[in-house]
């Protein structure tokens, strides 16, 4: 799964970042970035909080 989602997330981050930098569809471009950050935060910090380092 990581072999598929890793590059996909990278492409989405790059495209949305470019849209935000040039000022096109900034609200719509921010939504996928927020979702990616929430998933990254949960997937990395939740195991630490649960004590399964």
Image: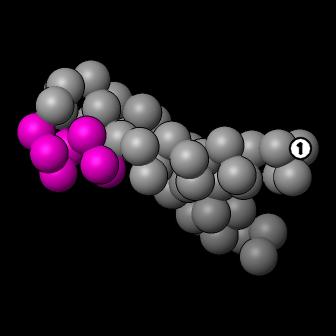
Q: Name the residue under label 1.
A: 1
Q: Is mark 1 on a helix, strand or loop?
A: loop
- x%, y% of residue 16? 35, 41
Magenta region includes residue 19:
yes
- Which range is magenta? 17-23
> Residue visible at 45% across and 49% down?
13
Q: Colour mode?
A: one colour
The answer to whether 44 is drawn above or below residue 14 in the figure is: below
Q: From this viewpoint, which residue is outermost toward the front?
A: 22
Instruction: For the N terminus, give its image quadrant.
Output: top right
- The answer to whether residue 50 is seen in the rendering is no
Q: In which quarter of the image is residue 29?
A: top left
The answer to whether 41 is drawn above or below residue 38 in the figure is: below
Q: In which quarter of the image is residue 51?
A: bottom right
Q: From this viewpoint, which residue is outermost toward the left?
A: 23
- x%, y% of residue 8? 66, 43
Q: In which quarter of the image is residue 34?
A: top left
> Residue visible at 17% across and 51% down?
21
Relative to 42, 13 lies left or right: left
Instruction: For the C terminus, give its image quadrant.
Output: bottom right
Magenta region includes residue 15:
no
> Residue visible at 51% across and 41% down?
12
């Amino acid at each position: 799964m990581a072999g598929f989602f890793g590059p996909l997330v990278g492409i989405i981050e790059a495209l949305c970042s470019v849209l935000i930098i040039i000022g096109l569809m900034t609200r719509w471009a921010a939504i996928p970035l927020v979702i990616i950050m929430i998933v990254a935060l949960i997937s990395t910090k939740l195991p630490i909080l649960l004590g399964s380092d």
